Image (spheres, rainbow, N blue to C red):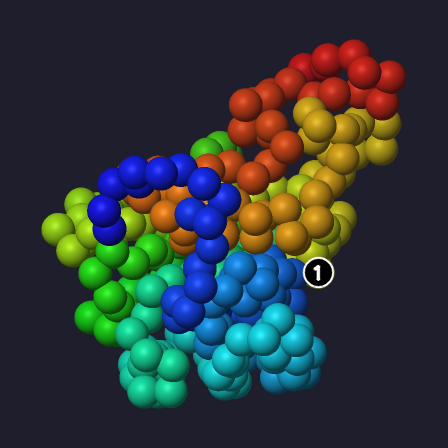
Amino acid sequence: MAPIADLGPDRILLTDRVAVVTGAARGIGAATAVALARFGADVAVCDKDPGPLPGVEAEIAAAGRRCFSEVLDVRDGDRVRDFLGRVRGRLGPIDVLVNNAGGGFRALFESVSPKGESALVAENFTTVANCVRHGAPLMADGSAIVNVTSVEAYHASPGYAVYGAMKAAVQQFTQTLALELGGRGIRVNCVAPDMIATPGEDALTEGSGAIIEGLAPSPLRRRAAPEECAAVIVFLASDMAGFVTGTTIPVDGGTVAAAAWKVGADGRFVM
């Protein structure tokens, strides 16, 4: 990718690029897939839950872009390889890879079985490794990879020990990939969301005390829509972020910056 000589609104466009989004049936994944299409990309989507995928396909088509969709569990490396090969065959070389699939459950570490631990590692780290391993060779030089982690990568995660550790691992993996793939001009970055109103976020926070009555959910005093995370992913995928690699952008309304500080409903800061 050449340096930006003339900065203008067209630099954010992804016209005729090919994007892949995993975990695209709902939440951040669905919002991202639709946003990429609206900014001009043809989009391949996958999810292990087939139910909502047709709706995402319809929105991509409504944006006037091509869509390729499969029901896929990205924990399965062989199936990921085959899917990405079909994406290249149907749509062309991959320009944008968004690794969004992931998830977890709440339990203190002493209650997590070895099987549960392996499941968390597979869902939150192996999924990313599978897609990069099989996707990077199919990507055009100057492409972009965006990994969706979590603010749990930045602080202790009681009840989510393995989940948080895997999100931190993805952040470190991203930094290493940025160096290893930099020679091809492939940029690798993360977004770290928090307080995004999605089914996954609601399931993780239910009963955990993460949202406490009387406290604002974030320093911005609100939660966010999935589209607000998708907007940052579009930026990282575009030429506007042509010199941005190996970094993470929290999309969290300021919760990482706040650390132990909370904002009361009356606007006071409490610790």
Of 238 and 269, the residue lying toward us: 238
Q: Is residue 34 left or right of residue 97?
A: right
Vertical side of 271 occupied by 203: above or below = below
* Above or below for 78 versus 203: below
* Residue at the image point whose x is 76% and y is 35% from the top: 222
The kind of residue on which mark 1 rests is: Pro
In percent of width and height, residue 2 lies at 23, 47
Tell me what residue is drawn at x 58 percent, y 63 percent.
38
Q: Quadrant of residue 29?
A: bottom right
In the depicted structure, whether residue 114 falls above or below residue 262: below
Residue at horizontal 73 percent and vertical 40 percent from the top: 223
On the image, the x and y values in percent for residue 166 come to: 40, 51
Q: Residue furthest left?
A: 183
Tell me where residue 78 appears, x and y as whole percent. Answer: 30, 84
In this rendering, the count of numbered labels is 1
Residue lying furthest front in this view?
6
Please tell me how crowded label 1 is: few (under 14), some (14-19), or many (20+) other residues with Cα within 10 Å: few
Circle 1 residue: 199
Looking at the image, residue 43 sits to the left or right of residue 64; the answer is left
Q: Nearer the viewer, residue 2 or 69?
A: 2
Vertical comparison of 26 with 190: above or below: below
Question: Label 1's element?
Answer: helix
Residue in view at x 66 percent, y 75 percent: 62
Instruction: Please say whether residue 169 is visible from this viewpoint.
Output: no
Q: Is residue 263 visible?
A: yes
Q: Position of residue 17 (x, y in %)?
A: 39, 67
Where on the picture, by quarter, is residue 146? bottom left
